[in-house]
Image (spheres, coloured by chain):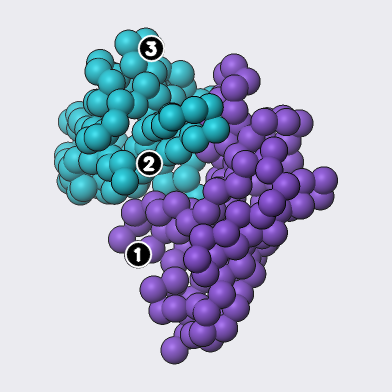
Chain colours: A cyan, B purple
Amino acid sequence: GAVVSQHPSRVICKSGTSVKIECRSLDFQATTMFWYRQFPKQSLMLMATSNEGSKATYEQGVEKDKFLINHASLTLSTLTVTSAHPEDSSFYICSARDRGPGETNEKLFFGSGTQLSVL
Amino acid sequence: AQTVTQSQPEMSVQEAETVTLSCTYDTSESNYYLFWYKQPPSRQMILVIRQEAYKQQNATENRFSVNFQKAAKSFSLKISDSQLGDTAMYFCAFMKLYSGAGSYQLTFGKGTKLSVIP
């Protein structure tokens, strides 16, 4: 089956630094990728939708200047948390859309997530 | 906007027994998918089952089946012959299709924590 690779799986950084998280689709072309955030014991909240070659679309309340998303190729999207603060500590998950053959075969595959801890 | 409601924060089931997790949703869309995802302690999101709204037949995947009631906007998951490895958080999710902004995004419920007891 399709695989989405997300790195790093865990990162600890100092307050004020920037952290980049990569999301790669390994065996399919992902025209659309999504970035989610999950707080402990809570559900996944969509942060932004990333389309290859265009600007990301951010959900209401998500600061686009803090969470920079780049989707420069059909297999790679990156999320950069700029000037990270302790309140940015969370579990970040990407997913990639694999359209598959035909209109009725929409599938989303998830990366394994990144636990960000900002000290 | 779509909403997904899971009214059971936690459930438990004896190994080998059957359990049903509830999910209701609200939407004005006509083209959509519904999903159940499993998130074990590893936190990897794993697709359990998917239902296309235009299909009347309930989806099944081995021990997992759904009861999709479109008019009632209900989408419950039945797990038969529960196994210890089924212990996880289960999220119900909605995906809008082919409809401009917001298409293909997943809207998740708050999840149900399922514990399978030996």
Residue B30 visible, this orientation = yes
| Left-right relation of B10 to A87 | right
Indicate the secondary structure of the residue bearing disc 3: loop
Q: Position of residue B68 (x, y in %)?
A: 71, 53
Q: Give the alpha-carbon distance from disc 2 to disc 1, as whole Å.
A: 18 Å
Place of residue A52 in the rendered image (x, y in percent of width and height, measured from the top left): 34, 16
| Residues indicated by labels 1 and 3 sit on the same polypeptide chain | no
* Image: A19 above or below A69: below
In the image, residue B111 lies at what x, y percent? 55, 57
Q: Given the current orientation, which residue lies at the most extreme top position?
A: A54
Rendering quarter of residue A32: top left
Name the residue type under label 1: Pro
Protein chain holding label 3: A
> Residue at (25%, 26%) from the top-left corner?
A75
- The nearer-to-camera label among 3 and 2 is 2
N-term mark: 3 or 2 = 3
Circle 3 residue: A55
- Image quarter of residue A83: top left
Numbered circle sitting on residue B17: none
Chain containing the residue with disc 1: B
Give the residue at mark 1.
Answer: B41
